[in-house]
Image (cartoon, coloured by chain):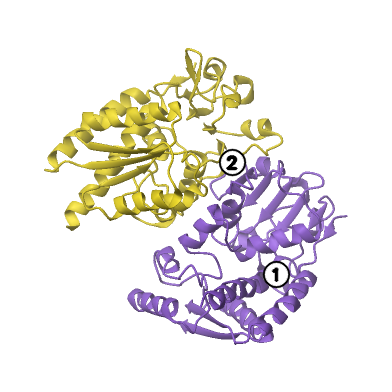
Chain colours: A purple, B yellow
């Protein structure tokens, strides 16, 4: 049976440490969340972030628009980027009804980009000495460190190449000081099983309910490390991309859903907020 | 026997078309090349670019420094970025003796970045409607189009994840309108053979003479498409990462070295220069 990677426990440890550090800064930090649309699943994610922010003593302001014109949205984001009272900005995805989301994400100042989604922040992650981890990447690296999982010489299979999970990890693995061999499986990949079977580490993060619990025990290499950043509600059950019961019999390590990657990523937003804010305070 | 993809012939066609278009612009275009160090291999690449520029009627100025302080180099690049008389800037890599090359590449204005190496230009390639192909990516896409090679549902294996080849293709394949499943093999990949064997398309571009002709016929899938962006001089022979003789017996398509990707990438620099300059002229 696989070792279950306890993201809940690790997130609590990081949270306690961070709360103390934020308290020591001597002023209240301010995170602005921007949200467009009224999808209920998004509500849950935003509420979670607001709740953790409150626990940390951070002031969180959510700018929610059921519908908004593109130019008005641009002005909101540019305004927050320029506002000295705002320490961090988080654009909750998806931006319902807004084309070219990246052009909006790129209006977030790299010095406030807690989610590491603008091209400047991504470029720093890829190439610069000083960078921020995107929340999912930082969360996985923290789990690997806590459980002494070696990943540098592993072949990593990314199930999905989206912004928040697959692509963020891909950028990190390409760094000159990393160069981790890896594959990205997309919906156009004809034989995903053949590629998944080669993975020493498998990291899944694909939306869409048809992708719930699709990675099963028979598909993975014996002793693989399986990280599940998917999240679905199937009736009362909450599951990820991985079929936990069968995979946990064959993997060496596995993250549960819930209680794996999820709670870590929320805390990581505040870890990034603290880093950016303390740098601004130091340089002020 | 594989069909040999004739990059020389295709590059001539693109060059003739481009020369006419550049001639029709009504003013001489100006490309600035920046080069640091005195590696003789780099000389060859620069001479090739200068020669093709001359053929096109483009004015090419090479700013060559055997050694230069970082701050002085930054001023050179910023100066060229600001200079209205300069239409395109090409930073020849490697920048010998200069740390953090990316920070220098990011000083090139995205509106003059003919090599698509700054984070702004890369971000546009990943996400924006209007973008430039990095020369290697454009060259490969042009060959695929000319020879009717379907790549969207293929599994592509990138042998190497460097800036100019593997990483540039990776960015392109991740676009929302592409989402091509692919793997990146690095020097840390333990069993590269297993991954190469899955490739419907294999694209190689790794420096270092120990990587000359390392991809052999026994390693590839029957009927695979094999693209070789490697380049080495072994005595009098010029070769790439692919062992042409054995691979051409098993592949469906293969690029030769020389005469494959090389001549196309040089022309592509001028294709990008033309695009950027004509846009600037239109907006002036």
Q: Is residue A217 left or right of residue B242?
A: right
Residue under the point 35% across and 50% down: B77
Report the front residue among A26 and A229: A26
Chain bearing tag 2 is B
Residue A264 badge = 1
* Residue count near mark 1 (Cα–Cα under 10 Å), binned few <14, some 14–19, many ≥20: many
Above or below B243: residue A238: below
Residue A21 image point, x, y percent: 69, 79
> Which residue is most to the left?
B26
Q: Which residue lies under the disc numbered 2? A: B184
x, y percent for residue A284: 51, 78
Work out whether residue B173 or residue A233 is closer to the camera in this orientation and state it: B173
Q: Residue furthest right?
A: A1
Name the secondary structure under disc 1.
helix
Report the chain holding disc 1.
Answer: A
- Cα distance in 3D space between marks 2 and 1: 27 Å
Of B77 and B176, the residue lying toward us: B77
The image quadrant of residue A164 is: bottom right
CA neighbours of label 2 inside 10 A, class few (<14), some (14 to 19), many (20+): many
Left or right: residue A76 compared with residue B61: right
Q: Tell me the quadrant of the picture where the N terminus of chain A can be found.
A: bottom right
Count of residue discs: 2
Marker disc for residue B245 = none
- Residue A206: horizontal and vertical position, in percent? 60, 59
* Tags 2 and 1 touching, CB below 8 Å: no
Q: Which image quadrant is residue B63 in?
A: top left
Identity of the residue drawn at 46% across and 82% down: A84
Q: Is residue A220 visible?
A: yes
* A268 to the left or right of B158: right
């Amino acid at each position: 049976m696989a070792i279950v990677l306890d993201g809940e426990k690790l997130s609590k440890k990081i949270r306690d440490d961070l709360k103390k550090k934020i308290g020591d800064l001597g002023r209240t930090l301010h995170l602005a969340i921007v949200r467009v649309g009224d999808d209920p699943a998004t509500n849950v994610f935003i509420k979670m972030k607001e709740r953790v922010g409150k626990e940390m003593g951070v002031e969180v302001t959510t700018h929610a628009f059921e519908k908004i014109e593109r130019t008005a949205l641009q002005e909101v984001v540019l305004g927050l980027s320029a506002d000295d009272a705002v320490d961090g900005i988080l654009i909750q995805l998806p931006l319902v009804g807004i084309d070219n989301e990246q052009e909006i994400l790129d209006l977030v100042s790299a010095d406030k980009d807690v989610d590491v989604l603008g091209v400047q922040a991504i470029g720093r992650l890829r190439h610069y000495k000083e960078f921020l981890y995107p929340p999912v990447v930082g969360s996985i690296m923290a789990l690997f460190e806590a459980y002494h999982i070696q990943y540098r010489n592993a072949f990593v299979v990314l199930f999905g190449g989206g912004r928040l999970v697959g692509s963020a990890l891909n950028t990190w693995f390409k760094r000159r000081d990393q160069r981790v061999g890896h594959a990205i499986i997309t919906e156009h990949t004809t034989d995903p099983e053949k590629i998944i079977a080669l993975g020493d580490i498998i990291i899944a993060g694909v939306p869409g309910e048809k992708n719930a619990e699709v990675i099963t025990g028979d598909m993975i290499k014996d002793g693989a490390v399986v990280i599940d950043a998917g999240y679905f509600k199937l009736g009362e059950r909450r599951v990820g991309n991985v079929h936990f019961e069968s995979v946990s019999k064959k993997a060496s390590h596995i993250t549960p859903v819930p209680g794996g990657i999820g709670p870590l990523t929320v805390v990581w937003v505040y870890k990034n907020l603290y880093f950016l804010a303390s740098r601004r305070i130091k340089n002020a």
